[in-house]
Amino acid sequence: MEIIDGKSLATSIREGLKSDVHKLKKKGVSPNLAVILVGEDKASQIYIKNKSKACLDVGINYEEFFLSSDTTMEQLLSLIDRLNNRDDIHGILLQSPMPKHLDINEAFRRISPEKDVDGFNPVNVGKLCLNQDGFVSCTPAGIMKMFEKYNIEIEGKNAVVLGRSNIVGKPMSLCLLNKDATVTICHSKTQNLSEITRGADIIVIALGKPKFLTRDMVKEGAVVIDVGINRTEGGLVGDVDFDNVKEVASYITPVPGGVGPMTVAMLMSNVVKAATRSIKNS
């Protein structure tokens, strides 16, 4: 059994990006990320702080736009339009969740596909579906990097994705499918769940349920990727019962220190990619 060290892999990716940023600045382009947060969500504020630290570390410029929770849709779309039109902004990130009265999908549609570093604009989702080069949602992109780094074979393997969110589950299943895995997506209506997971060579779980995936649901030698981050009285835990599942898994990600740092590293990577493309397009 090997524990996948997302933290050290993310650090090495960020080191590589520093040199990319340095080269871009020599060409007169300073990669710049705009982050929009609507409302007072505490978890979102922590995520944004981590993203700003990562930008600082890599050398990416960073602008924050904090909007009050009573912001209207018109005001939000107007801000997105202004950022779309600014040549010095290369990436736009809209932090979720947003207040209930706002339509996040309409907002994602409004972000220019060239600046959609989170990969949520329908154009980029469509490109992923067609296996074309676009921006891929950061968490699935980070997981694919992990597979690459650890030489984990995907082609022909049975992969089970637990969760069907637009942020992780759906794009993850497409990433795996594009690498020739046989993919099953499970969700709250799935029947015989344990039977399905026990047949999996690769399991990616993103449910937000502490220690949901137990040892009896995992076959010997499976690769287990835990996307869950759950705050419990005992501290942060994932969606996997780590201590028991690691006894049967061939590879497993810990929480914290697994997928989380990779998500942020891939966001940085997408911003650098967007800045690089802006030179080609100008």
Image: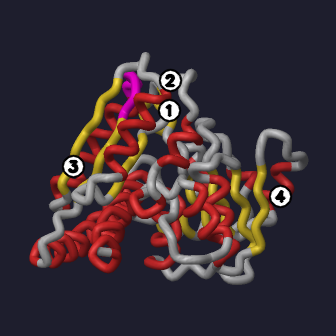
What amino acid is labelled 3 in the image? Answer: Tyr
The reply to whether dot 2 and dot 4 touch (C-beta < 8 Å) is no
Residue pointed to by mark 2: 99
Q: Earlier in the sequence, mark 2 or mark 4?
A: 2
Identify the mark nearer the N-term, 4 or 1.
1
Which quarter of the image is occupied by the C terminus?
A: bottom left
Amino acid found under the numbered disc labelled 4:
Ile
Image check: 228 left or right of 180? left
Residue at figure coordinates x 61%, y 81% from the top left? 153
Where is residue 272, by image quadrant? bottom left
Magenta part of the protein: which range?
A: 37-42
Considering depth in this image, is 105 or 236 the residue closer to the camera? Answer: 105
Q: Is residue 70 magenta?
A: no
Q: Which mark is residue 196?
A: 4
**Alpha carbon separation for disc pair 2 and 4:** 36 Å
**Mark pair 2, 3: CA separation:** 23 Å
Position above or below: 276 against 106? below
The one nearer the camera, 191 or 114, is 114
**Residue at 56%, 22% in the rendered image:** 101
Judge from the rendering whether residue 66 lies leftward or rightward of residue 195; answer left or right: left
Amino acid type at circle 1 is Pro
Q: Is residue 87 above or below residue 244?
A: below
- Where is residue 154? Give x, y as percent: 64, 78
Q: How crowded is the residue under tag 3: few (<14 C-alpha within 10 Å), some, or many (20+)?
A: some
Pointer 1: what residue? 97
